[in-house]
């Protein structure tokens, strides 16, 4: 039997980690990272050349979608459910807040990077709304604050 028929990957660290790249696609994992605490989230991003699929594997997470073309004018929170595929369409503003035990599977184009993405710095009122929403949906996050 050909030993090259199966690759196995696991990631138990913090943050974003690409695990598999093949041709034009990438599979990555996003796990809790201090920068994703709601009071530290400072921007929305959008990918200009690809959709991005989020799948919550464990823990709790809130995926925030932003309405607006060049600026985020409205934020729409989605409390993620385990095993549901959330396809963030190309050009859609988004960010995510995670509980400490959360793991998200990400599928995106292999070349997704800062160079082909855009960023919008949150306004103070938007940051406050994001924190308020997460405090309601993931109350334990407040115990994680330094």
Image (tube, rainbow, N blue to C red):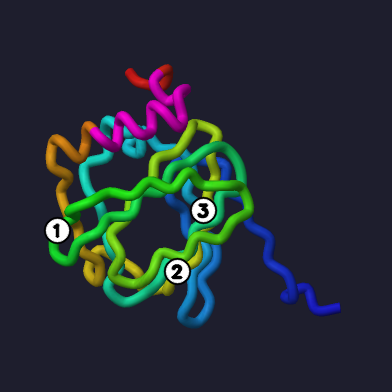
Question: Which residue corresponds to the image point at 50% horizontal and 66% vertical from the top-left?
Answer: 107
Label drawn at residue 29: 3
| Mark 1 or 2, closer to the camera | 1
Question: Which residue corresponds to the image point at 13% horizontal and 42% vertical from the top-left?
Answer: 123
Answer left or right for 58 relative to 136: right
Alpha carbons under labels 2 and 3: distance apart:
11 Å
Secondary structure under the numbered disc 3 in the rendered image? strand
Residue 112 occupies quadrant = bottom left
Secondary structure under the numbered disc 1 in the rendered image? loop
Q: Which of marks 1 and 2 is nearer the N terminus?
A: 1
Q: Position of residue 18 (x, y in %)?
A: 48, 59
Secondary structure under the numbered disc 2 in the rendered image? strand
Q: What stretch is highlighted in magenta?
A: 129-142
Q: Position of residue 32 (x, y in %)?
A: 46, 38
Q: Earlier in the sequence, mark 1 or mark 3?
A: 3
Q: Where is residue 114 in the image (x, y as percent from the top left)?
A: 25, 63
Q: Mark 1 points at which residue?
A: 71
Foreground residue among 54 and 135 = 135
Label drawn at residue 108: 2
Majority SS type along the magenta span: helix
Sort mark 3 into few (<14), some (14-19) or many (20+) by Cα contacts within 10 Å: many
Q: In which quarter of the image is the N terminus?
A: bottom right
Sort mark 1 into few (<14), some (14-19) or many (20+) by Cα contacts within 10 Å: some
């Amino acid at each position: 039997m050909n030993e090259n028929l199966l690759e196995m990957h696991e990631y138990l660290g913090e943050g974003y980690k690409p695990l598999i790249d093949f041709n034009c696609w990438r599979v990555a994992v996003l796990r809790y990272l201090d920068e994703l605490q709601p009071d530290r989230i400072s921007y929305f991003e959008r990918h200009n050349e690809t959709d991005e699929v989020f799948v919550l594997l464990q823990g709790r997470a809130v995926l925030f979608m932003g309405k607006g073309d060049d600026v985020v004018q409205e934020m729409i929170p989605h409390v993620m459910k385990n095993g549901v595929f959330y396809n963030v369409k190309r050009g859609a503003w988004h960010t995510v807040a995670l509980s400490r035990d959360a793991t998200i599977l990400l599928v995106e184009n292999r070349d997704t990077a800062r160079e082909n993405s855009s960023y919008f710095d949150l306004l103070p009122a938007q940051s406050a709304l994001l924190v308020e929403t997460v405090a309601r949906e993931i109350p334990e996050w407040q115990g994680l604050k330094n």
